Image (cartoon, grey):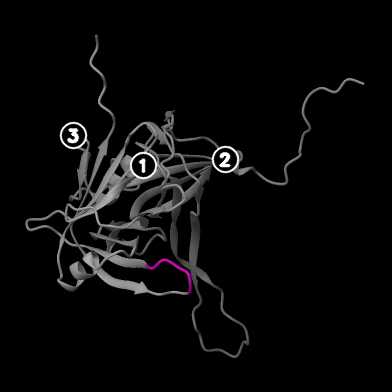
Amino acid sequence: MAFAGATKNYAAAYQTNDTRIAFALEDQYGIIPTGAYQMARFTGESFRQQFQRNRPEEIDDIPEAAQAVTTQVSVSGSLSGALSWGTYDDLLAAVMGGDWADDGLTNGRLVKCWTIIERLGDSWIIRNGGFIRQAQLNFSQGGFAQVSFDMAFKGEKRQGASPASSLIAAPTGDVINTVKGFGGLTIGGVAPEGCVRSFQLSLQRNGADTDYGMGHADACGIRPGELLATGSLEIFFRNYELYDRFVDGQQGAITATVRDGLNQGYDLTFLNASLQNPQINAGGKNQSVIARFDLEGNPQPGGGTFSIRRFKPETPPKA
């Protein structure tokens, strides 16, 4: 007997592998762009819409709760991914409040809002007025570079067609791993003794939030807040160099370098940071002592808290 074609109706639900996410910069807050959208690479997302429901506390002789009403709608969540060169440059610039210039990015005053579209099954979920409240980058021994962006939106709706006129293909570079891809760490321009076990970075819009008014349940606008750069470092404890730096209250540049197999990567720099809250403990028998420090980013005189430099091999000259 000949068998041809595929089995229908085999899936219990829409499949995550069919999901597509893309984003576009909004010219005006909350106005959904109709031009080209940039496709995103991602490992997961946690976006959700929530209604705040309240009930009037009227005093009466009926022993039941009053009818609830929607007083506020919030849409928020995170987009997570594996860091690769060029993949999240636009979103990193957004949380930094700056633009890339000569492959460099330093925190600035720009406010950037996004519409993110997501294809789930036979519909597109449109989330507009998106603002990045925090970006986190994590590098741990034996793993790959992880990135996540926490976002809040003005609203969300479902529609059958994409608002995008076209979709720009996502970058295809290799994911940065922490074996060959960790290019080292310098503190005050000097590489400390001992192997680094982990480096974590958080770029937060401190004080950022959404504002609400009467007449509608979605947000009126956002407060962009200010950049707050923090992080943490774990390193094998070989001497008291970093501990003494903490005790002396020294501040200076702290830079981590990461790259992919083609030597494309980033220098991630706290421009004026200090080491805080050391944890240096003998945790148990037959163990190496690990030193853990919090990283406190502070502005340089005249401004500037964090910078990113992207690099790639120079193109060989044409013959």
Nearest the eye: 50 or 43: 43
Q: Secondary structure at mark 2?
A: strand
Q: Is residue 262 above or below residue 291?
A: above
Q: At x 47% / y 50%, what residue is drawn?
A: 143
Identity of the amino acid at label 2? Answer: Ser
Nearest the eye: 119 or 256: 256
* Left or right of residue 85, residue 307 in this image: left
Q: Which residue is mark 3?
A: 102
Q: State the image quarter where residue 116 is shown.
A: top left
* Left or right of residue 242, residue 218 in this image: right
Closer to the chain start, of discs 1 and 2, is: 1
Q: Main secondary structure of the magenta part?
A: loop
Q: Which residue is mark 2?
A: 123
Q: Secondary structure at mark 1?
A: loop
Task: Name the spot of residue 189 as percent of width and height, x first.
Answer: 17, 52
Q: Which residues are magenta?
A: 285-289
Front tag of 3 and 2:
3
Question: What distance separates the C-alpha of mark 3 from that of mark 2?
Answer: 39 Å
Q: At x 24% / y 69%, what residue is drawn?
A: 243
Q: At x 22% / y 65%, what residue is drawn?
A: 241
Q: Classify mark 1: residues with Cα within 10 Å, few (<14), some (14-19) or many (20+).
A: many
Q: Quadrant of the N terminus?
A: top right
Q: Which residue is mark 1?
A: 88
* Contact check, label 3 and label 1, Cβ < 8 Å: no
